[in-house]
Amino acid sequence: MTEDNATKQVNRLSLNWVFTVSLLCIFLVFLFVSGLAYYRLVSVNQILENIAQNETPKILLFDKISTEATSLVFYTEQLAQAKNPPSLRIAQSAATSQLNSVGALIGRGDFPETVLVEFSAINAEIMELIQLVKDKINIESEVQQTEQSMYASFSDFLSESITSDSSNVDLKKTEWGVSFSNLIALSSQVMNTNRIHEINRTKELIANKFEILNSELAKKLPADKKPLANALSRLFKLYVLSGKGLIAQRIMQLRVDGRTRGRGEFTKKLVSDFSRSVGFQTQQLNGQIIRETERTNEFVSQQIHVVGLSTLLALLLLAVIGLILRIRVIERLTLLNQLVLGHLDVDKNEIKLQGNDEITDIAHTFKRFTRTIEQQKQALSVLAMSDGLTGIANRRAFDEELDRQITVAKRLHHPLSVLLIDIDFFKLYNDKYGHIQGDEALKSVAKVLKESLNRNIDFVARYGGEEFVCILPNTDINGAIQVAKRFGTAIANLQIEHKYSDAAPYITVSSGSATLQASELNLHSHADVLVKADKALYQAKEAGRNQARAYSE
Amino acid sequence: MKCFLLCFAMMGFAVQHQFVIAKESDNLQASILFSAEMQLLGRKSDGGYARLASVLSELKQNDRPIFFLFGGNSLGPSPMSTFDSGSHIVDILNSLGPDAMGVTKREYSYFEEQLSLRAYEAAFPMVATNIIDPINMSIQDGLVSSVVISKGDIKLGVLAIVDPDAAQQYLLQRVEILDIKNSIIKEAKKLRERGANVITVMHAKQFTAIDDLLKEGIIDFSLLKDRYLDLSDNTGLGEFHTYKDPRVILTQPAEVAIVDIFINSDGLIDIQWSKKSLLNQLEDSEVAKQRNDYLRRLDRLMDLPLAKVTESFDTNRKIVRTRENRFGNFVADTLLSFTDADAALINSGIIRGNTEYQLGHTFSRKDLANELPFRTGVVVLDISGRDLINTIESSLSEYELQKGKFPHVANMQIQFNSSNSLGSRLLSLKIAGKEVVEGKLYKLATTDYLFSGGDGYISLKNGKLSKTSAATPALLSDLVMQKIITENRVGSPLSARVVNVNDRG
């Protein structure tokens, strides 16, 4: 047993362990695969959520700002081009409301500093541009007013109506008058000149001519014309040559025009830069999202591969586990079952049950039990085949043995003899000496009979009550008689007192033998030989007991 | 030989120009104040318009007539001009009131149309003698070929010359630049017919044609300001150049010239000129206010800090146009960062800052606008190795003249020998370490200016716009700004991208 235990510990691959590990593996694989799938799905979900909740709205916002900013360029242009207060008001309101909406949109997003600085600059620029355009329009109207005032002042001089003062008409015809008309014409020219340096040249010209007008030409005038001429001169100086005069104003207007254009260009460029800046951010973000989406795509494909592979591996693992279980458990259990069913001789171990685990434990245990059973079976068989009292074979054993010996005798062509031995007057002995003594006597007789057998092949059994039977293979009539006589002598020598026996004062036996030749042996021989032996015994009893008789036809 | 030529030149001037040293008996008739080359309002080292204005008003207090001629070279490029194409300069000049302004190639920084608009805004004529609009065969809209200004006894005829390189460098499409000599001869004749008794020409670069015309007496004196002119290697100037020489030459940023015109007893006209520095002058308050307003407007947009300079770099003109440069590399790298190109190429001419940036300096948007004031767009081209090789070869062609065509690259390795003859300077051209194959197509990120053949990059025009090139090209300055902000640095390390094997430095 200790050796068994020792082998049990070494190289033991317990099924408990196999099952635990297998189930654990399956469980872990399942956990791993689902965990993996779950985790990956969560990641993808996060990315998609991010794209949907953060980046897409961001792009839409940027896009919107870009579009609005582009509109702003247009409104800025409108501003710069505004020619009169109403159009300025319209452009101003459009531009400021557009600014506000862009500003609001910017507030919603997460923009880099550059964009914020640009926008604040744009705001300031547009406000200043509005002011400048106002100035420009003001100056324009001032210039026009000055021009109109000028013409109004000189209308009498200039007009040729019949109702005009004759003195006026005369003045016009003088050299002074002609020069003065020229000067007025030159001044109007200023209104049509867009080049400041040309105006400056014209101014010089006018100044020179004016100088001559007031000095030379004025002197030539008749005295009554002089006051009018002086008045006109003064007006001319006021409206044309002075600091608030037409020329100065016109130059200022052109400069402010230039500044407005410059500022307009500046602001437009600023706004379109801003729009482009936002557009660029959008593009970057777009690119980012596309890259992220591509990455996510790749990631998802990767995950599909990973999860797919994991699942495949898991399935493979399950298959392997299944196979292992099949081989180690199912097949061996089947084998064990076959062993148990007794299709194979357990003791001979023709097919070994491999391994060292619970199944082999069962096999060993079963082996032990079968051995025990075998032993018990044998014991039982022995018990079943022996007489309880005397210990020699019983009737069942005899019947079997007789059948066997008949077969053997037939095969070997030997004669077969059977001897029936009966204790004389045994009932009387039992009555007189008691059952216990009776049992003792039976036991002694059985013992003597058994000991008297010479050969292994001879067989003696208790046939019933006080009757014994003996099988003598390969023994003819004479041989049987001799054995019978030997039995009789041996029992007589026991000298078991039997006062009440008529045959002798001790226990004696009567026996009858029957012999069958090999050729006589057939299916009925079992009963036949017993009938004959019984007839021979009857003869022995009839002849006075304590003797042997052989059957003869 | 050199000495002989110099002596000959001097004699030539003395004899042919009837050049006489002014004597006290000569009558000083008028003076001319000449200034030019002031693009940046904020650059104190230039002197500035406010100081110029005060010098002018000081001069005007004298009893003799003062002409004020402005030599141009100021409408661009500059950060402010990026937005208003020089409008602010015209506005300020209007306050100063020059009698005329000469047009130079830099006036074309924002192309012909804008210049015409500026001319209309100007209170003074803008003169360009050798420019023509080929469609109507007359001067470009708004400009004049010449102008006659009369003050006192002097009728001053003013001409101005545009550098013929402008066509290629500034990609002029709508105007043609005529031959200098012929244009001046033709126009000078007209001026004399209109009664001009003194004729001058303004220019921003030395031309031998002008020297010849002076000798021949077609023109009486010339006015030149060029801070990049190196007098030391110029024959005919240097130690032989005096203030009697009819060639008035200014080479320092804050210099102005005062040219005195004399009429001697024979009725002949002589000149004598002197230099004056603006640096110690007071500022005219009106003009200063105007300038400050403009600077304020620019600053509120541009005063944004971008990144701290962690390794000093220099965009000095000479350095940038002759060798690999940290900033040039950074700009080229920007092109590579924002496109899917194999390599990137820019010309050094778009880098205008001419400034050294020290470690720790906070590089601002203004600094960036100073460096990259042009509205350059980014394009991606599919170009053959052959065209690329030709392009790089031609970019090295005027190396010794420090032209803006000198290249800066990314993911490209150029090896050249500057002492080789033209057309054989390029020794090796590699992209990503592999020698460029003539028949292979490469993706090149570059500027729309170069793609249009600017600065002589004609072979680039053979390239085709790649599919990935944006429909509306992004502005290079925008992208560079993004890169500076994102990577929090300015400048890329030198990595032997452009190597001159002839270099000892």
Image (cartoon, rainbow, N blue to C red):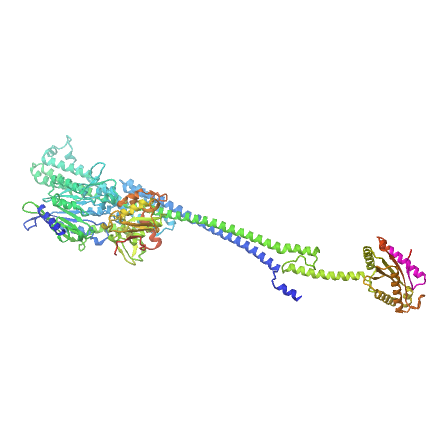
Q: At 71% across and 56% down in the image, what residue appears?
A: A342
Dominant secondary structure (helix, strand or loop) of the stretch shown in magenta: helix
Q: Is residue A137 above or below residue A494?
A: above
Q: Is residue B87 above or below residue A552?
A: above
The answer to whether residue A20 is seen in the rendering is: yes
- State the residue in front, B31 or B246: B246
Residue A462 on the magenta span? no
Which of the image's four quarters has the C terminus of chain A? bottom right
Quarter location, residue A147: top left
A549 horizontally vs B52: left or right: right
The answer to whether residue B241 is seen in the rendering is: no
Whole-percent x, y for residue A98 in the image: 34, 44
- State the residue in front, A273 or A178: A273
Instruction: State the extent of the magenta-drawn residues as a range.
Output: A528-551
Number of disc labels: 0
Quarter location, residue A457: bottom right
Quarter location, residue B166: top left
Whole-percent x, y for residue A495 in the image: 89, 69
- State the residue in front, B236 or A118: B236
A298 horizontally vs B356: left or right: right
Whole-percent x, y for residue B447 in the image: 31, 46
B337 horizontally vs A246: left or right: right
Which of the image's four quarters has the N terminus of chain A? bottom right
Whole-percent x, y for residue B394 in the image: 27, 46
- State the residue in front, A36 or B401: B401
Residue A546 on the magenta span? yes
